Image (cartoon, coloured by chain):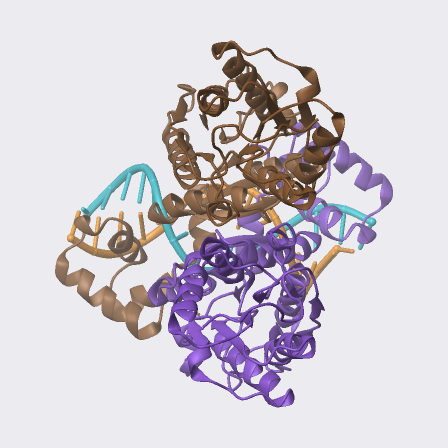
Chain colours: A brown, B purple, C cyan, D orange
Amino acid sequence: MANIKDIARVAGVSVATVSRALSQPSLVRPATIERIEVAIADLNYEPNHLAAGLRRQRSDNVIVAVPSIYNPFTSAFVEGIENVARAHKMRVLLGITEGDSDTLNKYVAMIAGKQADGMILLERNLPDIVRKPPAKGKMPPLVAACEYPPDITLPRVRIDNHEASALIVGHLAELGHQRIAAITGPLDQFMSKDRLSGYKLGLLRARLEYDEALVANGDFSLQSGFDAMVRLLDGGAEFTAVACANDEMALGALSALQQRGFGVPDEMSVAGFDDLRFGAFASPPLTTIHIPTVEIGEAAMRLMLDVLLQPDDVQPSREVILPHRLIVRQSTAAPRRRKRK
Amino acid sequence: MANIKDIARVAGVSVATVSRALSQPSLVRPATIERIEVAIADLNYEPNHLAAGLRRQRSDNVIVAVPSIYNPFTSAFVEGIENVARAHKMRVLLGITEGDSDTLNKYVAMIAGKQADGMILLERNLPDIVRKPPAKGKMPPLVAACEYPPDITLPRVRIDNHEASALIVGHLAELGHQRIAAITGPLDQFMSKDRLSGYKLGLLRARLEYDEALVANGDFSLQSGFDAMVRLLDGGAEFTAVACANDEMALGALSALQQRGFGVPDEMSVAGFDDLRFGAFASPPLTTIHIPTVEIGEAAMRLMLDVLLQPDDVQPSREVILPHRLIVRQSTAAPRRRKRK
DNA sequence: TTGTAGGCGTTATCAG
DNA sequence: CTGATAACGCCTACAA
């Protein structure tokens, strides 16, 4: 493989000039640049990124830590991240953690090892280094694109889960529902708690009472939504609507209702959260909260670029909050018909 | 940041010994290793991967080229790839092409630039270099994990789309369907053609006639499945079952049928392909072909590791074919009731 | 079992 | 505008 020296020789210039021609062409005479470009094309030269990285002390990679990529939700984030990374000549290194903290910490160590310049967290776990920053040596560039307790001082991008949940409960209440159930995510995650408290806020605003018997926990999966719906139905409490903490669980709930012979929305209104594209084609199409997933990823990557450019000490610790919106489809309607016990 | 020299000094050995202790501990006296480990822990040393890579001429990265990651299907492949990459201390670099050939070619160039050691293709596009290999300089390590024309001599992993499609048509025929429609993928893709020809094979085996009026084209998206179903319904041809080239389109078709008031499976049987988890929770749950997506990714990465270890000249050009299987759920049943025009 | 020393291919500094 | 040269941090013969 040709290297910069070969190009220099063939073009009749020094390696320094070749390097400049490539990175700061304005400093090189056009005629010289042309000679160099010819040589590059002739020899099929491709700059060695490893050598450049070693010299410049950066890899132009950013790690994206996710529990799993096999998830329409996560992958939309990643898509957004990659979009702006690519536009800035950076690459995305996938870091799948499977929810394991040790694995996550190893990925963080890759930053010190120069495999990556920073990391974007799409994880509920937090790397150890955030809780106890090293005395000497500086913090690796980290950006959070998921929910973390508010006391963490990481640049972050998120949506207002609290208000969004309240919004959807408000929508159901406006339709006339008095007894609105909830299917939550795993409550050890901050995001789930946030959406649950938004549900409560929504009830409060509609002057409806909170009833623990109307809350079932899931884990964001289809199956857990199905199961939670079954528990709710079997629980004996009356209700005419259910707000699910994400679309997957809502789709699972829909499936359970269908299996039990409940008509949606006639006998039961169902709402989701996330606006997965599958929701729009469900039977019936799912009312949900749209969140700008790809844009969240893009914003996170932009935050990362900011951090990477920061003069080390000044950390503005920005927080970006992206807008959500209610999407009303056919899975929610005014309550009517028989009530079931 | 501490470097290998610092460790050597603190541990009272030479850099060579430190290097060996890290990569081939068996060549170093245990007592020495221990001293080195203490120093490493003390100084919080992390080997510089860029420097090591420069020296060894590899990055330990593998590029995964995909048109988009925002797709349950693709992301399952990637998950599999990452699984085995991680187990072999390699990293996955995401290469999103958006279906653009130039972008793909740029990713290939990254291999020459040592940003990655090889590339796994999850793309319908083929890099230029495959068609016209460079005279001098050797081929970058490439593995195909999607469909390519059979004449391409790349190591590849795939499933038998042809037989799988025939299998599902056979299933419908066995149920008693005589008029079986098809919703295909985009026919410029080899995979779509393969599935279509499998559909024809299935008809042939069941001694059913192929009727062009029963074939509608889609592009693998939910919406296109919906639209294709509508066209089929409006086309006027009679049929009692439809085999879709993937689950997304099948789900879209289901949605169209529901909107038109068709009962599934009573009035129309619908089958998909891929076994997305959303299919199992559709109304009704979708009959489909299960394909081992994650395993395909894993197999592709193993193939890549093989290629990377190959003594340059010997390219076995292996092909791995993974098994599929029919999953019968409630969206298919024997034809009955009224027939519609 | 350990040490010495020569690159790997770039970039950046400093002179010219 | 261009050239010479010293790093960047590590690995690996080769020697001891």
Residue found 64% across the figure and 87% down from its top: B206
The residue depicted at 65 percent of the width and 34 percent of the height is A105
Residue farthest along the right direction in this orientation: B30
Q: Is residue A67 left or right of residue B94?
A: right
Residue at 52% x, 13% y: name it. A201
In the displayed structure image, the side of residue B115 where residue D2 appears, left or right = left
Looking at the image, residue B68 lies above or below residue A205:
below
Q: Which residue corresponds to the image point at 65% horizontal and 53% vertical from the top-left?
A: B280
Q: Position of residue B281 (x, y in %)?
A: 63, 49
Number of numbered discs overlaid on the protein picture: 0
Q: Position of residue A14 (x, y in %)?
A: 28, 59
Image quarter of the C terminus of chain B: bottom left
Whether residue A128 can be seen here: yes
Residue A210: % across, % down: 61, 13
Q: Please, is residue A206 above or below residue A156 in the view? A: above
* Location of residue A149 by image quarter: top right
Give the quarter of the figure containing the N terminus of chain B: top right
Could one spot residue B138 in this view of the protein? no
Q: Nearer the viewer, residue A334 or A123?
A: A334
